[in-house]
Amino acid sequence: MGLADELGIERYGWIGGRTAIEQEIPRVVAALARVAELLAEATADAVSAEAEYRHWKAIATSDQIARERAIPEWKARASVEASIPYRDHHRSIAEATERLELIKGFQVALLCKRDFITALLASTPLSQTEKERRGVA
Protein backbone atom coordinates (compact mmCIF):
# COMPACT_ATOMS: atom_id res chain seq x y z
CA MET A 1 0.00 0.00 0.00
CA GLY A 2 1.55 3.28 -1.15
CA LEU A 3 1.16 6.81 0.16
CA ALA A 4 -1.36 7.64 -2.58
CA ASP A 5 -3.53 4.72 -1.45
CA GLU A 6 -3.25 5.72 2.20
CA LEU A 7 -4.39 9.26 1.39
CA GLY A 8 -7.12 8.09 -0.96
CA ILE A 9 -5.93 10.44 -3.69
CA GLU A 10 -6.87 8.20 -6.61
CA ARG A 11 -10.25 7.37 -5.09
CA TYR A 12 -11.24 11.03 -4.70
CA GLY A 13 -9.83 12.04 -8.07
CA TRP A 14 -7.47 14.68 -6.64
CA ILE A 15 -4.71 13.47 -8.90
CA GLY A 16 -5.44 11.44 -11.99
CA GLY A 17 -2.55 9.01 -11.75
CA ARG A 18 1.21 9.11 -12.00
CA THR A 19 1.23 11.10 -15.25
CA ALA A 20 -0.81 13.90 -13.67
CA ILE A 21 1.59 13.96 -10.73
CA GLU A 22 4.56 14.18 -13.07
CA GLN A 23 2.92 17.06 -14.94
CA GLU A 24 2.75 19.00 -11.69
CA ILE A 25 6.54 18.92 -11.22
CA PRO A 26 7.40 21.67 -13.77
CA ARG A 27 4.66 23.88 -12.29
CA VAL A 28 6.09 23.55 -8.82
CA VAL A 29 9.63 24.17 -10.08
CA ALA A 30 8.51 27.30 -11.97
CA ALA A 31 6.57 28.53 -8.94
CA LEU A 32 9.60 28.00 -6.69
CA ALA A 33 11.76 29.98 -9.13
CA ARG A 34 9.25 32.84 -9.14
CA VAL A 35 9.03 32.77 -5.35
CA ALA A 36 12.83 33.02 -5.19
CA GLU A 37 12.63 36.21 -7.31
CA LEU A 38 9.85 37.63 -5.13
CA LEU A 39 11.78 36.73 -2.00
CA ALA A 40 14.85 38.59 -3.25
CA GLU A 41 12.75 41.65 -4.11
CA ALA A 42 10.94 41.59 -0.77
CA THR A 43 14.22 41.24 1.12
CA ALA A 44 15.67 44.21 -0.75
CA ASP A 45 12.53 46.25 -0.02
CA ALA A 46 12.68 45.42 3.70
CA VAL A 47 16.39 46.29 3.91
CA SER A 48 15.80 49.50 1.94
CA ALA A 49 12.89 50.56 4.19
CA GLU A 50 15.03 50.02 7.27
CA ALA A 51 17.96 51.94 5.74
CA GLU A 52 15.71 54.86 4.76
CA TYR A 53 14.32 54.97 8.28
CA ARG A 54 17.78 54.96 9.91
CA HIS A 55 19.02 57.66 7.53
CA TRP A 56 15.97 59.86 8.16
CA LYS A 57 16.21 59.34 11.93
CA ALA A 58 19.90 60.29 12.05
CA ILE A 59 19.29 63.48 10.09
CA ALA A 60 16.13 64.40 12.04
CA THR A 61 17.85 63.83 15.39
CA SER A 62 20.91 65.81 14.30
CA ASP A 63 18.70 68.68 13.06
CA GLN A 64 16.77 68.68 16.35
CA ILE A 65 19.99 68.94 18.35
CA ALA A 66 21.33 71.67 16.02
CA ARG A 67 18.13 73.73 16.47
CA GLU A 68 18.13 73.44 20.24
CA ARG A 69 21.75 73.23 21.36
CA ALA A 70 20.90 72.74 25.05
CA ILE A 71 18.59 69.78 24.39
CA PRO A 72 19.89 66.40 25.60
CA GLU A 73 20.23 63.72 22.92
CA TRP A 74 17.58 61.49 24.54
CA LYS A 75 15.09 64.34 24.39
CA ALA A 76 15.89 65.00 20.72
CA ARG A 77 15.40 61.30 19.95
CA ALA A 78 12.09 61.27 21.82
CA SER A 79 10.92 64.30 19.86
CA VAL A 80 11.84 62.64 16.55
CA GLU A 81 10.14 59.39 17.55
CA ALA A 82 6.94 61.27 18.35
CA SER A 83 6.72 62.70 14.83
CA ILE A 84 4.44 61.58 12.00
CA PRO A 85 7.33 60.75 9.61
CA TYR A 86 8.68 58.36 12.27
CA ARG A 87 5.33 56.53 12.29
CA ASP A 88 5.26 56.49 8.48
CA HIS A 89 8.74 54.99 8.30
CA HIS A 90 7.78 52.27 10.75
CA ARG A 91 4.62 51.53 8.77
CA SER A 92 6.77 51.11 5.63
CA ILE A 93 9.09 48.74 7.47
CA ALA A 94 6.13 46.73 8.78
CA GLU A 95 4.57 46.44 5.32
CA ALA A 96 7.86 45.34 3.75
CA THR A 97 8.39 42.80 6.53
CA GLU A 98 4.83 41.49 6.16
CA ARG A 99 5.31 40.97 2.42
CA LEU A 100 8.61 39.20 3.07
CA GLU A 101 7.04 36.86 5.62
CA LEU A 102 4.09 36.07 3.34
CA ILE A 103 6.45 35.13 0.52
CA LYS A 104 8.49 32.96 2.90
CA GLY A 105 5.28 31.19 3.87
CA PHE A 106 4.40 30.62 0.24
CA GLN A 107 7.87 29.22 -0.35
CA VAL A 108 7.43 26.78 2.54
CA ALA A 109 4.07 25.68 1.11
CA LEU A 110 5.64 25.04 -2.30
CA LEU A 111 8.50 23.10 -0.76
CA CYS A 112 5.96 20.96 1.09
CA LYS A 113 4.11 20.40 -2.17
CA ARG A 114 7.38 19.41 -3.85
CA ASP A 115 8.12 16.94 -1.06
CA PHE A 116 4.56 15.58 -1.28
CA ILE A 117 4.88 15.03 -5.04
CA THR A 118 8.25 13.34 -4.54
CA ALA A 119 6.75 11.02 -1.94
CA LEU A 120 3.79 10.23 -4.20
CA LEU A 121 6.05 9.44 -7.12
CA ALA A 122 8.19 7.21 -4.94
CA SER A 123 5.15 5.28 -3.69
CA THR A 124 3.13 5.07 -6.92
CA PRO A 125 3.92 2.03 -9.08
CA LEU A 126 4.88 2.63 -12.69
CA SER A 127 2.36 1.60 -15.32
CA GLN A 128 3.54 -0.96 -17.87
CA THR A 129 3.69 1.73 -20.58
CA GLU A 130 5.88 3.94 -18.41
CA LYS A 131 8.13 1.00 -17.54
CA GLU A 132 8.63 0.27 -21.25
CA ARG A 133 9.20 3.94 -22.02
CA ARG A 134 11.87 4.14 -19.34
CA GLY A 135 13.38 0.79 -20.23
CA VAL A 136 12.58 -0.69 -16.82
CA ALA A 137 10.32 -3.52 -18.12
Image (cartoon, grey):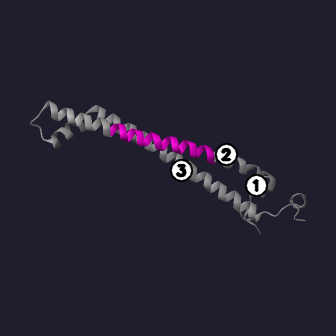
- For label 1, the residue is 12
N-terminal label among 2 and 3: 2
| Residue 64 in view here | yes
Q: Nearer the viewer, residue 64 or 125?
A: 64
N-terminal label among 3 and 1: 1
The residue that appears at 15% across and 30% down in the rendered structure is 67
- For label 3, the residue is 105
Residue 101, image x and y in percent?
48, 47
Residue 134, image x and y in percent?
86, 59
N-terminal label among 1 and 2: 1
- For label 2, the residue is 30
Q: Nearer the viewer, residue 136 or 84?
A: 136
Cα separation, mark 1 vs mark 2, equals: 27 Å
Q: The magenta stretch spans which residues?
A: 32-53
* In the image: residue 10, left or right of residue 132: left
Of badges 3 and 1, nearer the viewer stands 3
